Image: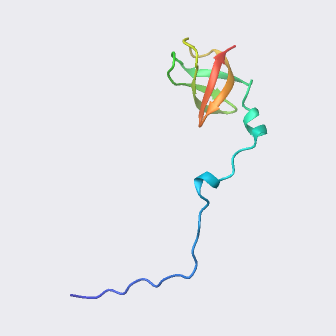
Amino acid sequence: MKNFPLPKASSTVAFSTPTHMATRPAVEDLLDYLNNAAIVSDDINPFQSGRVYFQSSWWPAVCPQNIHIPSGRTVRVIGRSNITLLVEPV
């Protein structure tokens, strides 16, 4: 049986910031999303995710009301949950 050399230990140790201690976006950054218009690109069905074009990018979106929003309609952003925008028809 052949012995292979073990890698040398490094004296530097890198620590990452725990998730619960990471900095959160400022309230002002979150408010930039609110009351802005977006265009529905994939239909938003009641309580199901669709897709909108918002601030030069496509985002998943959901409407908390029991309504269908067809593609091409303008919606208003009323909130955000992670990367999903909460929208309502204009």
At x 68% / y 33%, what residue is drawn?
56
Instruction: Name the image colouring.
Output: rainbow
At x 28% / y 88%, what residue is drawn?
3
User: Is 61 in front, or is 73?
Assistant: 61
Give the vertical position of 4 relative to 28 (above or below): below
- Single out the residue that lies furthest toward the top: 67
Question: Image quadrant of residue 28?
Answer: top right
In the rendered image, residue 55, in percent from the top left (x then y), is placed at 70, 32
Question: Image quadrant of residue 65?
Answer: top right
In the rendered image, residue 33, in percent from the top left (x then y), is placed at 72, 31
At x 58% / y 78%, what residue is drawn?
12
At x 64% / y 31%, what residue is drawn?
80
Give the vertical position of 30 relative to 68 (above or below): below
Q: Quadrant of the N terminus?
A: bottom left
Q: Quadrant of the C terminus?
A: top right
User: Is 42 in front, or is 26?
Assistant: 26
- Single out the residue that lies furthest toward the front: 20
Left or right: 36 as drawn, with respect to 66: right
User: Is 78 in front, or is 42?
Assistant: 78
Count of marks, rendered view: 0
Question: Image quadrant of residue 51?
Answer: top right
User: Is 32 in front, or is 22?
Assistant: 22
In the rendered image, residue 62, in percent from the top left (x then y), is placed at 56, 23
- Single out the residue that lies furthest toward the right: 28
In the rendered image, residue 53, in percent from the top left (x then y), is placed at 63, 27
